[in-house]
Image (cartoon, grey):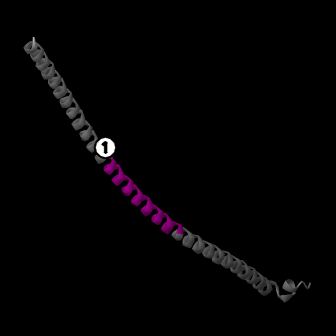
Amino acid sequence: MTQVQGSNLLDVLKKKMRQTKEEMEKYKEESEDMARKLQVEIMRREEAEGEVAALNRRIQLLEEDLERSEERLATATQKLAEASHAADESERIRKALENKTIWRMTELLFGSSVGSGKT
């Protein structure tokens, strides 16, 4: 009976070892699968970080471009205001000269008495 018990015990131990080995293989595969997934996630994260860095650089360049554009707009607006003022002044001078010319023409045609209000 001791040999039967020993044989039974040996069979139980072999079965247990087989089960343990199968479990170990299963967990090893799961571990390898998780390691692959981790690598993929690390690569995705690094790629995303690279995209974020590129987008941040693009934002910086766009902000610099906006700043230069705003400076050019301010300069152009100032020049436009100056040109508008000069145009208004030229128009004022043109009208004054036109009135002066009309006044002189009237004096030449009708004499000084018309221009002075004398009749």
* 51 left or right, relative to 71: left
Q: Is residue 98 above or below residue 23?
A: below
Residue at the spot 14% in from the left edge and 24% down from the top edge: 18
Q: Which residues are magenta?
A: 45-70
Q: Amino acid at mark 1?
A: Glu
Magenta stretch, main secondary structure, is: helix
The quadrant of the image that shows the N terminus is top left
* 31 left or right, relative to 88: left
Q: Is residue 18 above or below residue 114?
A: above
Residue 80: in magenta span: no
* Residue 57 x %, y %: 39, 60
Give the camera-side residue of 108 and 76.
76
Give the camera-side residue of 23 and 29.
23
Q: Secondary structure at mark 1?
A: helix
Residue matched to label 1: 41
The quadrant of the image that shows the C terminus is bottom right
* Residue 34 x %, y %: 27, 37
Give the camera-side residue of 101 and 37.
37
Q: Residue furthest top?
A: 1
Q: Is residue 1 above or below residue 47?
A: above
Disc 1 packing (10 Å; few <14; some 14–19; many ≥20): few
Give the camera-side residue of 72 and 113.
72
Residue at the spot 71% in from the left edge and 82% down from the top edge: 97
